[in-house]
Image: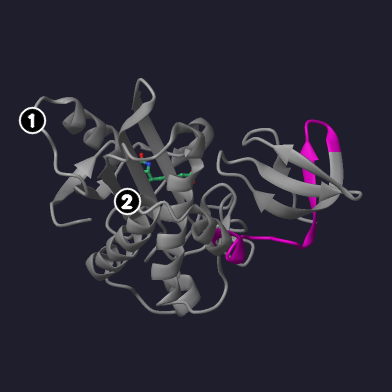
Amino acid sequence: VGQNLIRLSAVDSTNNFLKEMVSKSEPLPEGTVIMADNQFAGRGQQENTWHATAGLNLTFSIFFKPAFLPINKQFMLNIAVSIGVRKALQQIVPQGIKVKWPNDIYFGDRKLGGILIENTLSGNCYKSSIVGIGINVNQEEFNPDQVKRATSLCKILQADVNLIDLLGQICGSIEAEYFKLKSGNYTALLTEYLKGLYRFNEEAAYREGLIIFKGRIRDVTETGQLIIEVEGRNKSYNFKEIEFLNN
Ligand code: BTN
């Protein structure tokens, strides 16, 4: 991952750019990385936008061809990538980096980064996966509606971090987890994911539609459902069905 690195000074979205490259005829090497110094129309999950101040943060996308991945284990790629990012960040911030289901990167109760994976299927196989990653690195100021919910590595460390070094660490770490995925070691990946999962086994408040309840996250399935124990019974939630509340 990252042997073939294309660095752009500005682009709307590295995911869009990479998707376009993949759709062009010549085959693109797996592990190709597109990074942008300035991504001016970054996309997040659930049609959110992803803001990154030019030159200060990491915004990049990786091209994978996980044709080996069974369709019913689709979430395992998210898991492998999340673990890879978390482990790389732990080398700089040893304590407190968590993955918030499905694949946000958290420090304490604040968001440090996010992952947006976009898959193309061909019949029953994964043809391509565009793994987009945004990490707040050297951004010190956040606008008022973000300031309570977001943080950055430089705010945590009180020091700047070299973007290219960090990119290299994250790519290496994701590659290691991707090889585990390829070898089919799903149980080990899932266990590792749960170990670093935000609010795992902790009592916390959630909202499902208009209903607010307390429960404990107990598991995540290979297809990506979150399992929360509520009043002694396990309930399964899809992304979009549930919102994490601040207690
Ligand atoms: C989220 O938290 O909702 C996911 C954010 C993903 C942002 C990254 S930045 C690089 C890549 N290009 C995009 O347009 N989005 C992803």
The numbered dot on residue 17 is: none
Given this view, does label 1 or label 2 mark the residue nearer the observer? 1
Image coords of residue 175 (percent x, y): 30, 59
Q: Could you tell me if residue 13 is visible in this image?
A: no
Q: Which residue is at 53% across, 33% downward?
A: 46
Looking at the image, is 95 positioned above or below residue 124?
Answer: below
| Mark 2 burial class by Cα count in 10 Å: few <14, some 14-19, many 20+ | many
Give the amino acid type for the residue marked by disc 1 in the picture.
Glu
Seen as rendered, the residue at the extreme right is: 231
- Which residue lies under the disc numbered 2? 59
Q: Which residues lie in the magenta part?
A: 193-211
Q: In the image, is 67 to the left or to the right of 78?
A: left
Q: Is residue 45 at least partly visible in the picture? A: yes
Is 40 on the left-hand or right-hand side of 4? Answer: right
Which residue shows up at 17% across the image and 48% down it?
Answer: 9
Q: Quadrant of ligand 1?
A: top left
Q: Is residue 151 above or below residue 244?
A: below
- x and y percent of residue 185 in the render? 45, 56
**Residue 38 rendering spot, x and y as whole percentages:** 26, 48
Which quadrant of the view contains residue 191? bottom right
Residue 212 forms part of the magenta stretch: no
Q: Which is nearer the eye, 189 or 205? A: 189
Can you tell me whether the CB of the residue at mark 1 lies under 8 Å from the nearest atom of ligand 1?
no
* Image mark for residue 26: 1
Q: Earlier in the sequence, mark 1 or mark 2?
A: 1
Ligand 1: does it lie within 8 Å of the C-beta at label 2?
Answer: yes
How far apart are the two marked residues, 1 and 2, measured between alpha carbons? Answer: 25 Å
